[in-house]
Image (tube, rainbow, N blue to C red):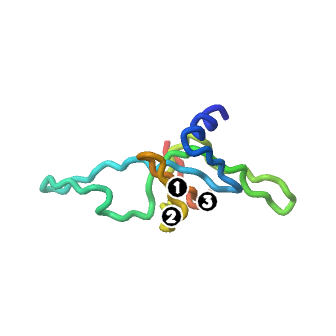
């Protein structure tokens, strides 16, 4: 949990609630066409993208009042559905952060 506190110190001291996860967008590699033209990541809109988990909420509660743990941990590299809503997107310096529901995380990248 020390890692989470250190990372949170640098991310506006945000602690997600419920099953929400705070993810830092990882930079994507620029694509090059066959003719050598470099295409920046802004040219191609993607629904899924890669990020680094920097904070997690405590998880949802079931009908019995028990917490259901979140399936990712701080430091995991993940593939997630990038939210189209601007209210889930934040900036801290040059970092782009997203607050997403656990269900929007598709996979852990190993």
**Image quadrant where residue 60 sits:** bottom right
Residue 102, placed above or below residue 2: below
Label 3 Cα crowd, 10 Å radius (few <14 / some 14-19 / many 20+): many
Which residue appears at 53% of the width and 48% of the height? 108
Mark positioned earlier in the residue sequence (3 or 2) = 2
Instruction: Measure the C-alpha gap from mark 1 to mark 3.
Output: 10 Å
Return the mark for residue 101.
3
Picture disc at residue 98? 1
Q: Which of 83 and 14 is in front in this view?
A: 14
- Distance from Cα at disc 3 to Cα at disc 2: 10 Å
Residue placed furthest toward the left: 35
Left/right placement of residue 14 relative to residue 41 reads right
- CB within 8 Å, label 2 to label 1: yes
Assign the N terminus to one quadrant of the image: top right
Dot label at residue 50: none
- Distance from Cα at disc 2 to Cα at disc 1: 8 Å
**Measured from the top left, where is residue 49 in percent x and y?**
44, 56
Depicted 69 relative to depicted 5: above or below: below
Q: Name the residue under label 2.
A: 83
Q: Position of residue 92 (x, y in %)?
A: 48, 48
Q: Where is residue 110 in the image (x, y as percent from the top left)?
A: 49, 42
Residue at disc 2, secondary structure: loop
Q: Are marks 3 and 2 in contact (CB under 8 Å)?
A: no
| Residue displayed at 61% across by 61% down | 103
Q: Residue at x 59, y 38 (%)?
A: 9
Q: Is mark 3 on a helix, strand or loop?
A: strand
Q: What element carries label 1?
A: strand
């Amino acid at each position: 949990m020390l890692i989470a506190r250190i990372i949170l110190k640098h991310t506006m001291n945000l602690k997600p609630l419920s099953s929400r996860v705070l993810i830092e967008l990882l930079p994507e590699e620029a694509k090059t066409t066959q003719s050598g033209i470099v295409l920046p990541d802004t040219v191609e809109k993607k629904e899924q993208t890669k990020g680094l988990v920097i904070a997690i909420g405590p998880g949802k509660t079931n009908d019995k009042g028990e917490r259901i743990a979140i399936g990712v941990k701080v430091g995991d590299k993940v593939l997630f559905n990038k939210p189209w809503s601007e209210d889930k997107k934040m900036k801290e310096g040059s970092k782009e952060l997203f607050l997403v529901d656990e269900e929007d995380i598709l996979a852990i990248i190993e």
